């Protein structure tokens, strides 16, 4: 009995030790990934490597940790690719994602090394402007969506369980976002002619750390949940509200939602971050946000803030908010909305200049 009891205690201690190691590894991974998103500097690389080694050891005895190990491997591989260490990054990915076939090209992940120039898009597909809005209107939009403003807590934006949310307007309504949309409809009318047909908009926004990207996706109504398949807008506009080089560029590809081949391997365009720079692209084009690389301009607390507006032939259904924020909501009259309803005075001093996207050949 004494020997059997001793063996049970040993097994219990081993299991307890494994559980403690697993919890410690999970905490390390979570903290390291958050740190890497806030400031993906060279110092974060060794922290990612250490976290990956720890979670791999723990996952060897606990398959439940495989998802955390995959997340850490993905982040470490990204950091290697961004530093030009593609061979090492590929080894890391192959271990955890043996069936993976494609990744973003080096010219994308190491953005900032190529120069602006001609792109291979069909006419009327994509265009960008600097100084896109009059200064007073740009300041009003930036104030309404200030990183420390009331908009974000009103939508529980920093809650990890918070999902996508957006607002729908007719273009004849009042407000600083709708006024910006009317300006964009005029500004991009020649470069992306489809925008001229719009009478309604849907808008959403993001406030993300320097190293946080956004997955490749197509813009669509109700997050693509239509009974007849996804319905795409005429076009979409991204307006940068934060300082230059804070966060990665927007990547727009030549891949269309109706394509049967993976044409995104053919060509794409990068539009780097700069305040009051706007990019407009057809609503059926695949696009994403590239994770920022290098130290974060403004430090770890700085955020890449963007306003996205999709343009529609007519406004689609609007919903009242009931509980958590959701897609296609009716704009409310809550206290936090006051900056969005502000009157913008001042001269029309807008002098937009065409900003050439950075072409990605492949």
Image (cartoon, grey):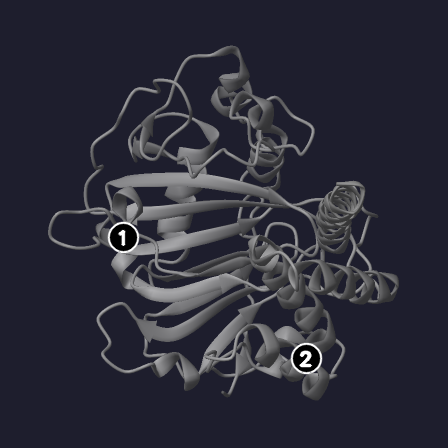
Judged from this view, the residue extending furthest toward the front is 1
Position of residue 24 relative to residue 118, above or below, is above
Residue labelled with disc 1: 233
Q: Position of residue 31 (x, y in %)?
A: 76, 46
Left or right, 128 with respect to 327, comes to right
**Front position in the image: 45 or 109:** 45
Q: Residues within 10 Å of mark 2 (few under 14, many from 20)?
A: many
Residue located 84% across and 48% down the image: 299
- Which label is found at residue 334? none
Q: CA distance from mark 1 to mark 2?
A: 36 Å
Q: Nearer the viewer, residue 56 or 273?
A: 56
Q: Give 329 or 146, whichever is nearer the viewer.
A: 329
- First in sequence: mark 1 or mark 2? 2
* Horizontal side of residue 316 vs 112, given as left or right: left
Residue under the image location 72 percent in, 84 percent down: 88
Q: Position of residue 232 (x, y in %)?
A: 25, 55
Residue wearing tag 2:
89
Disc 1 versus disc 2: nearer the observer: 2
Query: What's the residue at 46%, 12% (across, down)?
Result: 334
- Marks counted in the figure total 2
- Which residue is most to the right? 43
Q: Residue furthest left?
A: 228
Q: Which element carries disc 1, helix, strand or loop?
A: loop
């Amino acid at each position: 009995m004494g020997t059997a009891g001793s063996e049970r205690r040993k097994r219990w201690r081993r299991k307890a030790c494994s559980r403690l190691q697993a919890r410690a590894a999970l905490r390390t991974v979570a903290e390291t990934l958050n740190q890497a998103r806030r400031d993906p500097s060279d110092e974060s690389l060794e922290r990612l490597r250490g976290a990956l080694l720890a979670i791999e050891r723990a996952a060897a005895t606990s398959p439940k940790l495989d998802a955390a190990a995959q997340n850490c491997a993905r982040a470490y591989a990204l950091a290697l690719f961004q530093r030009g260490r593609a061979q090492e990054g590929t080894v890391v990915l192959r271990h955890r994602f043996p069936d993976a076939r494609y990744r973003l090209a080096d010219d994308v992940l190491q953005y900032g090394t190529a120069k602006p120039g001609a792109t291979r898009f069909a006419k009327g597909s994509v265009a960008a402007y600097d100084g896109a809005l009059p200064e007073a209107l740009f300041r009003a939009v930036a104030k309404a969506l200030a990183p420390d403003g009331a908009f974000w807590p009103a939508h529980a934006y920093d809650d990890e369980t918070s999902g996508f949310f957006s607002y729908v307007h007719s273009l004849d309504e009042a407000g600083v976002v709708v006024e910006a949309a009317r300006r964009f409809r005029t500004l991009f009318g020649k470069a992306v002619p489809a925008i001229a047909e719009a009478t309604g908009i849907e808008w959403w926004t993001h406030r993300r750390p320097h190293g946080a990207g956004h997955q490749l996706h197509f813009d669509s109504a109700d997050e693509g949940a239509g009974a007849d398949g996804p319905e795409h807008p005429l076009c979409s506009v991204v307006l940068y509200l934060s300082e230059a080089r804070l966060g990665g560029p927007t990547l727009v590809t030549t891949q269309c939602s109706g394509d049967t081949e993976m044409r995104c391997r053919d060509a794409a365009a990068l539009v780097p971050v700069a305040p009051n720079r706007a990019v407009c692209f057809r609503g059926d084009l695949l696009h994403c946000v590239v994770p920022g690389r290098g130290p974060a301009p403004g430090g770890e607390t700085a955020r890449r803030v963007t306003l996205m507006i999709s343009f529609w032939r007519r406004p689609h259904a609007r919903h009242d908010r009931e509980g958590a924020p959701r897609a296609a909501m009716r704009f409310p009259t809550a206290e936090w909305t006051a900056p969005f309803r502000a009157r913008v005075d001042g001269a029309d001093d807008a002098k937009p200049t065409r900003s050439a996207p950075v072409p990605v050949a492949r």
